[in-house]
Image (cartoon, grey):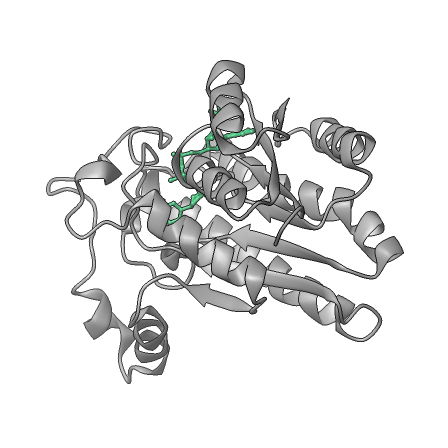
Amino acid sequence: MQDKIIVITGASMGIGAALALQVGQQQAIPVLVARSRVELEAVAAAAHPLALAIVADVTQRADVQRVVAEALQRFGRIDAWVNNVGRGISRPVAQLSDDDIDAMMAVNVKSALYGIQAVLPHFQERGTGHIINVSSMLGRIPFASIRSAYSASKAFLNSLTINLRMDLRHDYPNIHVSTVYPGVVATEFGLRALGGGMDSRHFPGAATAEEIAAAIIGCLQTPRADVYTRPGQHAQVAAYFSAADVATVEAGFGGPPPGR
Ligand SMILES: NC(=O)c1ccc[n+]([C@@H]2O[C@H](COP(=O)([O-])OP(=O)(O)OC[C@H]3O[C@@H](n4cnc5c(N)ncnc54)[C@H](OP(=O)(O)O)[C@@H]3O)[C@@H](O)[C@H]2O)c1
């Protein structure tokens, strides 16, 4: 990975910040993207002397295109692009508004699509590159109905990722496309969810941001289509979809708080 240029969206905190630090430890150069300048620049300074911090809102296509332009201007190439930005929501299906759906699509789907579409021409020109989309186990199994629109947006992201890989396979076999499926991670994700809710940092058995970052580093080193970040998660997905009666399995999942 030495000297590879790795763009990471959502790198001012949480998984993205942990990933930027680990990218630096691999002697690769992170390009960090988020909206909070002070936090972003602090992570960049800790990650690598050549790290580049770019303040941008990835729900805006023009901002994402600017990220590509600034990274290419500074380094002349991009080797990998990690679409890591994401936001949760705490709202049962019956209460979802149009604005809720639009917000989930903008931050969890369009942000990644903008990244894909902005960097892909560069990867195609070079015939090489790696796009990693950070999804969620909730995009595979609906463990928490309170997260319904988030889960759906991550399932949308999963489909985009798979189909992009299919589109590129024949003509661009050296452009890799991967999905990463973390379970609950101890970051501020829960607190920052639309509608508030559970603090992911205190969820029993939550993974650390560093654990997920290490899984993404593994994928950068050895590209794979699907990355489950804990043993047993892939089997859990297979068991859910092959159950004779999914409703029985769902009875063990989380639902809305009592009384709602
Ligand atoms: N934590 C979990 O339990 C968990 C579980 C499964 C999957 N995931 C996924 O993992 C990814 C990272 O989550 P996390 O836990 O690290 O979340 P986090 O701690 O809330 O961090 C989110 C990051 O995204 C940035 N961001 C948010 N909106 C942005 C926007 N519009 N433009 C640019 N940057 C933006 C934030 O920085 P600024 O506010 O400075 O912009 C921050 O750096 C997400 O895709 C999430 O869905 C998380």
Q: Nearer the viewer, residue 259 or 158?
A: 158
Q: Nearer the viewer, residue 183 or 220?
A: 220
Q: Position of residue 74 (x, y in %)?
A: 77, 30
Quadrant position of residue 178 = bottom right
Q: Position of residue 41 (x, y in %)?
A: 53, 20
Viewed as shown, does residue 202 lie left or right of 226? left
- Whether 116 is drawn above or below 124: the answer is above
Viewed as shown, does residue 55 lie left or right of 117? left
Identify the residue at horizontal 80%, vertical 53% (top origin): 123
- Whether 132 is drawn above or below 90: the answer is below
Q: Position of residue 70 (x, y in %)?
A: 76, 28
Viewed as shown, does residue 45 lie left or right of 232? right
Q: Nearer the viewer, residue 45 or 163?
A: 45
Identify the residue at horizontal 57%, vertical 40% (top origin): 8
Q: Quadrant of ligand 1?
A: top left
Identify the residue at horizontal 61%, vertical 31% (top origin): 51
